[in-house]
């Protein structure tokens, strides 16, 4: 009996020992391993995100891996080169000298086309130039609202346009003209803004008016502008990622055009042909930089400007189509109301591309130079 009891105890002990052995041989992760794994994943995601938001290096014209230099260029004080194109009567014989500023996703070749009647009859000379990062002009990573006006002043000086000259800008180039009126008004004989881009965050706009105008933009453009204003360091990523629609201008979406703009599509062929030239050095220091500066925080508001021609020795004109889907006419009207010295020309039924309509360039230049 005693021996049987001993055998039962031994069996129970054996089973307990087996269970303990199995428990002792089960796999256990070292202490804190999950924290380390999460940390590695987090660092990996941060590294990926950092790479994703970094724009590629610009392929500067004339560099070993960049496009060739084919245009005439001037060298600025900071060492950058700006490419330019001249048209009209010879510079030295011209009565009127105009610096033309192209819009977003364009270049010096997308200038204003005038009739011989205007060019020869009035004696007009026009120089258009590639804004920094576009075409064959060097990029300017330090570009600001003010620097563009100073670039234009240097162009005028190096080409010997005289103490005063005229400026005309279209779309994003039109926005640059506000900078000229602010920083180099003493150099201007006259200025024209053609469908100039607006900044919805300019001070001076009534909050309800700018909000309403902003909400009339295409949703994809609302997001592109919002990112450029609040998180400019994400501008490159936002406009190159494939998950969400990017800026309609950068994507060249036809949705940004009004019905009248679409009627002018055959005349836009030249713009489309020049897109590859405009973007040949890369998109970050050209298109993306435009968004960052154009919708960023400005150190002045156009509505705070003073009349640069108090004695009527020159004039400022603003042209706007009331069906423009890129630039809200309501905001242009408000600016014109706040600046009564501006000659405001609103075109019923016109969209953003109205300067391509027959006879319109002549009308714009004639109004600026001789007031007709």
Image (cartoon, rainbow, N blue to C red):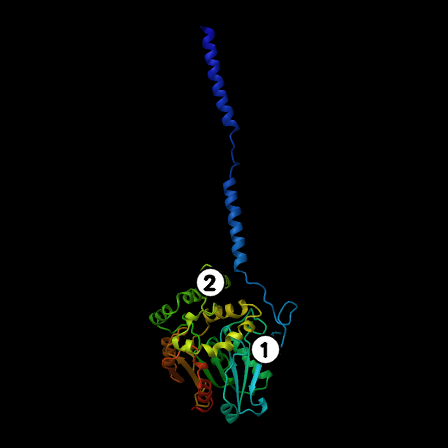
Numbered-mark total: 2
> Would residue 87 appear left or right of 8 to someone viewing this image?
right
Identify the image quadrant of the N terminus: top left
Residue 170 seen in this snapshot = no
Could you tell me residue 145's position as x and y percent?
50, 73
Could you tell me residue 38's position as x and y percent?
50, 45
On screen, residue 78 above or below 6: below
The residue carrying mark 2 is 231
Q: For numbered disc 2, what is the local secondary structure?
A: loop
Could you tell me residue 160's position as x and y percent?
59, 86
Query: Quick one: 28 or 145, which is closer to the camera?
Result: 28
The residue carrying mark 1 is 83
Q: Residue at x 48, y 19 (%)?
A: 15
- Mark 1 is surrounded, within 10 Å at the Cα level, by few (under 14), some (14 to 19) or many (20 or more) other residues, namely many
**Mark 1 / mark 2, whichever is N-terminal:** 1
> Would residue 135 appear left or right of 247 to someone viewing this image?
right
């Amino acid at each position: 009996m005693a021996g049987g009891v001993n055998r039962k105890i031994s069996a129970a002990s054996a089973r307990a020992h087996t269970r303990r052995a199995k428990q002792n041989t089960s796999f256990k992760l070292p202490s804190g391993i999950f924290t380390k794994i999460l940390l590695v994943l987090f660092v990996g995601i941060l590294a990926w995100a950092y790479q994703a938001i970094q724009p590629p290096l610009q392929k500067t014209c004339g560099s070993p891996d960049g496009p060739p230099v084919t245009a005439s260029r001037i060298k600025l004080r900071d060492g950058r080169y700006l490419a330019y194109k001249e048209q009209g009567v010879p510079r030295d014989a011209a009565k009127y000298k105009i610096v033309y500023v192209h819009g977003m996703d364009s270049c010096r070749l997308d200038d204003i086309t005038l009739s011989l009647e205007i060019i020869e009859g009035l004696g007009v000379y026009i120089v258009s130039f590639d804004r920094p990062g576009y075409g064959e002009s060097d990029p300017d990573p330090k570009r600001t609202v003010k620097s563009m006006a100073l670039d234009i002043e240097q162009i005028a000086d190096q080409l010997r346009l005289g103490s005063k000259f005229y400026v005309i800008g279209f779309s994003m180039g039109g926005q640059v003209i506000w900078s000229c009126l602010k920083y180099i008004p003493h150099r201007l004989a006259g200025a024209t803004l053609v469908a100039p881009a607006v900044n919805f965050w300019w001070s001076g706009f009534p909050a309800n008016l700018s909000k309403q105008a902003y909400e009339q933009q295409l949703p994809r453009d609302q997001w592109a502008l919002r990112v450029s204003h609040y998180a400019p360091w994400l501008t490159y990523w936002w406009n190159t990622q494939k998950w969400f629609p990017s800026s309609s201008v950068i994507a060249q979406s036809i949705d940004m055009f009004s019905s009248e703009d679409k009627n002018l599509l055959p005349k836009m062929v030249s713009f489309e042909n020049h897109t590859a030239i405009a973007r040949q050095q890369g998109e970050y220091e050209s298109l993306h930089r435009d968004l960052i500066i154009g919708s960023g925080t400005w150190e002045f508001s156009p509505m705070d400007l003073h009349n640069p021609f108090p004695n009527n020795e020159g004039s400022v004109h603003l042209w706007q189509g009331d069906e423009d889907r890129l630039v809200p006419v309501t905001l242009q009207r408000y600016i014109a109301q706040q600046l009564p010295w501006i000659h405001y020309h609103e075109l019923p039924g016109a969209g953003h591309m109205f300067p391509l309509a027959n006879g319109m360039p002549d009308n714009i230049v004639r109004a600026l130079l001789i007031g007709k």
